[in-house]
Amino acid sequence: MTSRRDEPRENRLERPIDGALHLLDRQLIDCEGALLGKVDDVELTQVGDDLAITAVLTGPAALLSRLGGRLGDELVAKWAQLKVSEPHRTRPWRIDMEDVERLDSALHLSVRRDGVLRRDREGHRLGRLTGMDVLGPDGERIGRVLDARFEPGAEGSLVLCSLIVGHGRPGSLLGYDRRSDQGPWLVRTVVRRLHRHTVIVAAETAEISWADSTVRLAERPSEAPSHPFG
């Protein structure tokens, strides 16, 4: 008889995931079951031609910075002023993806929490990518990035494969575009109606300008085949 402990455990990292929906705000658990906090942002690094997830970030510095704009900068600065004696306080704690084992309702590490946290390095963040204005080939505004979809790459890392673009706010889809049976019928219907113009665009057709906080598309997306609601 097979016990529940012997049953294969779910690991969403083995298939495509949406960064904001599946990673942000997930509980961090080490190999012994100890809690470390939550995923407050995700580090993105250009690896060759791919933009890959290289670490998850945790702590107030990551969460406050995710708010973006002047408000986010001001809150991070105030956080630093609370303890000026602590070096690099404005840089969030970083957990390398090599120390991550699997993802289900939480993000599980393959190591103990002691010593796993390190200050983040200079890099791009998912919280900065979501919310960027998306421009068409002629410079017209199409919408903003609501989420970013990643899939396992050749080296096992999660690489950007597409962007979810619409007119709402990041996180406003609430997962209703991912499953046809998600949530109450009425809420599902309203969300899908509000996001009827939301589309998925392939990463290779999108040029991300981190300096300008914009994404420019090589071609205007078609709503029909790439619509996230299917």
Image (cartoon, rainbow, N blue to C red):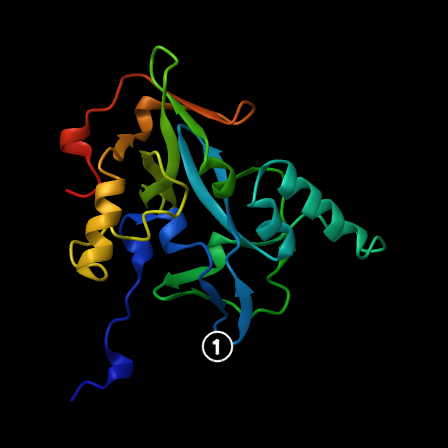
| Residue that carries the numbered disc 1 in the rendered image | 33
Q: Amino acid at mark 1?
A: Gly
Which is nearer the eye, 207 or 168?
A: 168
Residue 7 on image: x %, y %: 23, 77
Looking at the image, can residue 83 be seen? yes
Q: Quadrant of residue 170?
A: top left
Q: Measured along the vertical axis of the image, is residue 211 above or below residue 70?
A: above
Image x and y of residue 68, in percent: 57, 40
* Pointer 1 local density, CA inside 10 Å: few below 14, some 14–19, many at least 20: few
Residue 136 occupies quadrant: top left
Q: Residue at x 62, y 38 (%)?
A: 122
- Provide residue 169's location: percent of width, then percent of height: 41, 41
Of the pair 11 and 221, the residue shown nearer to us: 221
Picture quarter with the C terminus: top left
Q: Does the image show residue 177?
A: no
Vertical arrangement, residue 59 with respect to residue 217, above or below: below
Q: How many marks?
A: 1
157, 207: nearer the viewer = 207
Rendered position, 214 above or below 106: above
Give the residue furthest to the right. 85
Q: Quadrant of the N terminus?
A: bottom left
Q: x and y percent of residue 55 in the render?
A: 51, 49
Residue depicted at x 27% and y 35%: 198
Instruction: Give SS at disc 1.
Output: loop
Give left or right: position of 3 versus 74: left
Kindly identify the residue that appears in the image at 45 percent across and 59 percent down. Answer: 100
